[in-house]
Amino acid sequence: MPRTIPGPTSHVVVVGAGLAGLSAALQLAGAGRRVTLLERESVPGGRNGLLEKSGYRFDTGPSVLTMPDLIRDALAEVGEELEDWLELMPVSPLYRAFFADGTQLDVHANTAQMEEEISRVIGPEEAAGYGRYVDFVTKLYKYEFNDFIDKNIDSPFHLLTPNLARLVALGGFRHLAPKVNQFLSDPRTQRVYSFQAMYAGLSPQQALAIYAVIAYMDSVNGVFFPKGGMHAVPRALAGAAAKHGVDIRYNTEVTKVEKRNGRAVAVQTANGERFECDALILNPDLPVAWRDLLGRTPLTIKRLKYSPSCAVLLAGSNRSYPHLAHHNIHFGHDWEGVFRELIDERRVMSDPSILVTVPSMDDPSLAPEGKHSYYTLFPTPNLDADIDWKSYGPKYRDEMVRVMEERGYTGFGDSIEVEELTTPLDWESRGMERGAPFASSHTFMQTGPFRPSNLARGFENVVFAGSGTRPGVGVPMVLISGKLAAERIIGS
């Protein structure tokens, strides 16, 4: 059985009302623990934040929602139904992919519909290969989820299960790009079903094939959008937690953890309050939690390698573009070059591949009548790169607008009424190490049992939650990480 923390656990303090902290709080409340949840900001969500400006409502963090059953499971811990808290709309198509040769491909979760789309745009042989690829990623998910994702792991030996052998036989520990290429021969489909490696902080050539499971989570299982925007998810989780007794304190920044006899006994806040605890869950970015709250940085944390970052331009615009879907991916000419520049050379993309989300397309309430909100994400190097974002940020904003106009967003710059630019420097100021919102990368030695543990060595009752620990990055993973953190306290 995975380890649980020793001693009393009646009162648990959770620091940070991000998705992982909220998931943990619901699990703990459902198990009868008294929970105090302390959040620095005035709203829940962490990096799944909210910006309101001149009648526009922008999500400041993730824009893609997959695996909504994990939200359902979190709410069920306190006896609540998802439908009473959230209205989720299936996104169709999941993505609209635009390629440098002028072609486009709509990505659908329905296999028959997607085979028809691929056959129409590329050809029947590629469609047949896609069908085989769906079988592959579906098996990956089946073999991975219970034993390697939704499970606390204390030792690599805990991975020695029949499903490990099945994953090896399936080719899950080979590299992603060659594995995808076994099924798909056209560069367009290869890109559509391997770009998810970016979420893991790696190129498709570097990532393990097991990360094709991310493609299963969105491109097979489906993508959803909550009415009210992505921030509706943390609002719902926080509402349910408060209803069931979780004491949530907003505008409360924790600055120090008090330790006595190897245990955390209380936390102190910036406004001079003190909260005693039997157990403590820390949801801030893991290296930041170690350094700023626990007062030290273990060597294993110092050695972490980080994912690329991104620049996000949130724009309220008086223009609409009929050729767009909710989520739009614009691929440049040079696919491998994008990753080489970002990861190896640590410089901005010369031929960008970008994501543009138009949330007001499915929820007009997110923008004033007749107008639209745009979420534009350009991957960039993290702060390990020698880029002075303080001076370069405004120039890069102009470059982002130029690229968008080049990619079909005619007159986009002139249409902007309100905007907000987030650079790696801004991500760092929001508490993300190296300005990397995707946390430490998922290299082999930072994956599974080798990813930083959710148990804090030297503190027998402190547990971590969030993307920096296990199982990793992404909305589904951080929801699971909160559950796993709670299980360290209450058992599975």
Image (cartoon, rainbow, N blue to C red):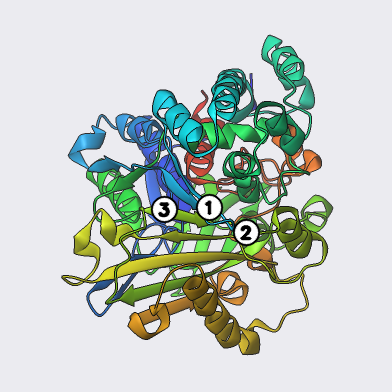
Which residue is tagged 1?
283
User: Residue 399's spot in the image, x, y percent?
Assistant: 57, 80
Decide if residue 86 is on the left or right side of residue 386.
left
Decide if residue 305 is on the left or right side of residue 476.
right
Mark 1 against mark 3, which lies toward the viewer? 3
Instruction: Please tell me how crowded label 1 is: few (under 14), some (14-19), or many (20+) other residues with Cα within 10 Å.
Output: many
Foreground of the two, 57 or 3: 57
- The residue under the point 49% across, 71% down is 404
Is there CB contact under 8 Å for labels 1 and 2? Answer: yes
- The residue under the point 44% across, 25% down is 111
Which residue is tagged 3?
327
Decide if residue 345 is on the left or right side of residue 274.
right
Q: Amino acid at mark 1?
A: Asn
Mark 1 → mark 2, Cα distance in angstroms: 8 Å
Q: Classify the position of the N terminus by image quarter.
A: top right
User: Residue 109's spot in the image, x, y percent?
Assistant: 42, 32
**Label drawn at residue 289:** 2
Dot 3 falls on a residue whose secondary structure is strand
* Number of marks: 3
User: Residue 285's spot in the image, x, y percent?
Assistant: 60, 57
Extreme bottom residue here? Answer: 391
